[in-house]
Image: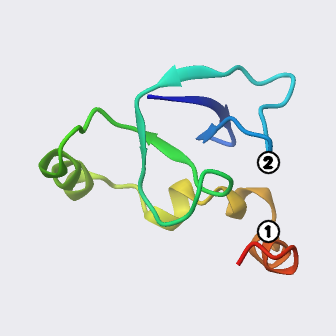
Amino acid sequence: EREVFRRSGMWLTAGEWGGPRDDETVEKRQVRYRTVGDMSCTGAVDSDADTIEKVIAEIAVSRLTERGATRADDKLSEAAMEDRKREGYF
């Protein structure tokens, strides 16, 4: 379970780096992260998978792409990753 809020169709983790905004509501949901990254740039997906086997089964039937569905930076701006590089994120 994590405290998340909805933005641009994704669940994002609440934190000092990006939210929530005043009009966004934080709620506790059981989620997991489907891609490499951290909570400041990666969206979470709803998941009740609690074992490796369940995670694999969930991924096998998923129709969401790792990059298209959960990379929050892609939804912020076309240059978001480049901006992170300039700010020393990588």
Q: Check disc 1 and report its element: helix, strand or loop.
A: helix
Where is residue 36 shown, x and y percent of the image? Answer: 48, 66
Which quadrant of the figure has residue 66?
bottom left
Where is residue 9 shown, x and y percent of the image? Answer: 61, 40
- Judged left or right of residue 43, residue 59 is left
The amino acid at mark 1 is Ala
Name the image quarter holding the C terminus. bottom right
Q: Residue at x 87, y 23 (%)?
A: 22
Is there a contact, CB below 8 Å, between mark 2 and mark 1? no
Tag 2 residue:
17
Q: In front here: 43 or 74? A: 43
- Judged left or right of residue 73, residue 59 is left
Tag 1 residue:
80
Q: In front here: 49 or 63? A: 49
- Judged left or right of residue 74, residue 65 is left
Q: Which residue is drawn at 80% across and 41% down?
A: 16
Where is residue 59 shown, x and y percent of the image? Answer: 26, 55
The amino acid at mark 2 is Trp
Can you name the residue that lies furthest to the left here?
53
Q: In front here: 6 or 26? A: 26
Q: How many marks?
A: 2
For mark 2, does the 10 Å Cα neighbourhood hold few (<14), some (14 to 19), or many (20 or more) residues?
few
